[in-house]
Image: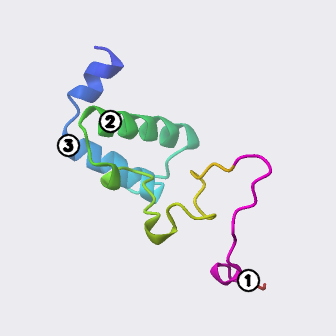
């Protein structure tokens, strides 16, 4: 059985358990996930979500940019070299430690 076939046949309950394990950093029985286990599980979850057309907003790692979409805070906005985007200083908060 190939990796693709395994993910294709993956039970939705197993997918949910893998996703929860990634989020918590531990297996359902309480054992801590190793970095390698987390990486492999994350790859499987991402592949599963892609293969099963899980809506983007329900996928692992999804960030809702909401009102910030298209602003200087949105990393997907590409500025040409030499362009200075308009920056509103009110959108930033100073954090003192």
Range of the magenta residues? 80-93
Q: CA distance from mark 3 to mark 2?
A: 14 Å
Q: Is residue 5 left or right of residue 64?
A: left
Q: Nearer the viewer, mark 3 or mark 2?
A: 2
Report which residue position mark 1 lands on.
Answer: 95
**Residue 87 sits in which quadrant?**
bottom right
Q: Nearer the viewer, mark 3 or mark 1?
A: 1
Q: Position of residue 50 (x, y in %)?
A: 32, 35
Q: Position of residue 54 (x, y in %)?
A: 26, 44
**Mark 2 neighbour density, 10 Å: few (under 14) some (14–19) many (20 or more):** few
x 20%, y 28%: residue: 9
x 31%, y 40%: residue: 49
Q: Report helix, strand or loop for mark 2.
A: helix
Q: CA distance from mark 2 to mark 1?
A: 38 Å
Report which residue position mark 2 lands on.
Answer: 50
Mark number displayed over residue 12: 3
Q: Position of residue 13 (x, y in %)?
A: 20, 46
Res 28 visible = no
x 31%, y 54%: residue: 58
x 45%, y 52%: residue: 61
If you read the primary sequence from the N terminus, does the residue marked by circle 3 or circle 2 appear first?
3
Q: CA distance from mark 3 to mark 1?
A: 42 Å
Characterize the magenta stretch by its predominant secondary structure.
Answer: loop
Mark number displayed over residue 66: none
Q: Quadrant of the C terminus?
A: bottom right
């Amino acid at each position: 059985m190939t990796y693709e076939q395994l993910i294709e046949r993956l039970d939705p309950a197993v997918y949910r358990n893998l996703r929860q394990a990634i989020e918590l950093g531990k297996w359902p029985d309480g054992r801590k996930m190793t970095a390698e286990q987390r990486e492999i599980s994350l790859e499987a979850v991402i592949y599963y979500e892609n293969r099963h057309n899980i809506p983007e907003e329900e996928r692992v790692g999804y960030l809702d940019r909401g009102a910030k979409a298209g602003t200087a805070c949105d990393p997907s906005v590409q500025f040409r070299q030499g362009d200075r985007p308009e920056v509103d200083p009110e959108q930033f908060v100073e954090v003192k430690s």
